[in-house]
Image (cartoon, helix red, strand yellow):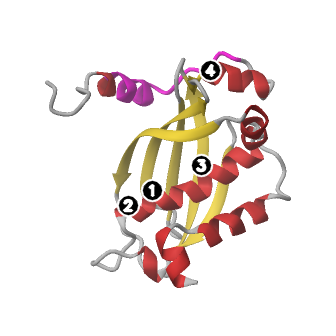
Amino acid sequence: MRQFDSMYPFIRMFYGLWKTRRMPPLAPLDTHVSYHTCLPWDLDLWYELNNGRTLTLYDLGRIPLAQRAGIVPALRKNRWGLTIAGVSVRYRKRIRMMERIEMRSRMLGWDDRFVYLEQSMWKKDGTCANHALFRSAITGKDGIVSPALMAAELNIPQQSPDLPDWVQRWIDADATRPWPPGSA
């Protein structure tokens, strides 16, 4: 089992989806709360949660959030997918082996191309260990699907709520970044 779970935590993902199947539905902008344990294969050389594994564990909050908010059925119905198109993470407190954390996941809003989500991991004493802002794209056979189409599928207003200022500043700053790298 360790070998299978050490690459991508499929077992934990399926267990998380199984646990959330009976939870009440969420409105698309509500917060999904889940609990996770830092296992030995999640550690880096300094015996704390590996920064890359942190991003993988965030999947364990985002996918059940999408399930509870009705996004997964809409994706299946339309043969759409979801992909991460950018992330900014702030790490503040170490998470050690066998430490249990609370993860909070929520969608903040969208623009004409992307959906913005925030996630955070909280320690037992109430301190935030890390916080991430994700930009996600809905994908279809012809490329990126407008988030307004997803909103229509979910029967919510197609116009996003105003994004927080700090999110908009991140979007604006990222738009100045050269692509491809080294081209400027």
**Mark nearer the viewer, 1 or 3:** 1
User: What is the x, y in percent for residue 91?
Assistant: 35, 56
- The region drawn magenta spans 158-172
Residue type at mark 3 is Ser
User: Closer to the camera, 110 or 99?
Assistant: 110
Q: Earlier in the sequence, mark 4 or mark 3?
A: 3
Residue 55 tag number? 1
- Residue shown at 56% from the left, 20% from the top: 162
* Comes first in the chain, label 4 or label 2: 2
What is the three-letter code of the residue carrying label 4?
Ser
Q: Quadrant of the N terminus?
A: bottom right
Alpha-carbon span between mark 4 and mark 3: 18 Å
Q: Secondary structure at mark 2?
A: helix
Upstream in sequence: badge 1 or badge 3: 1
Name the residue beneath numbered marker 2: 52
**What amino acid type should be assigned to the residue bearing mark 2?**
Gly
63 up-or-down from 57: above or below: above
Label 1 and label 3: CA atoms lie apart by 13 Å
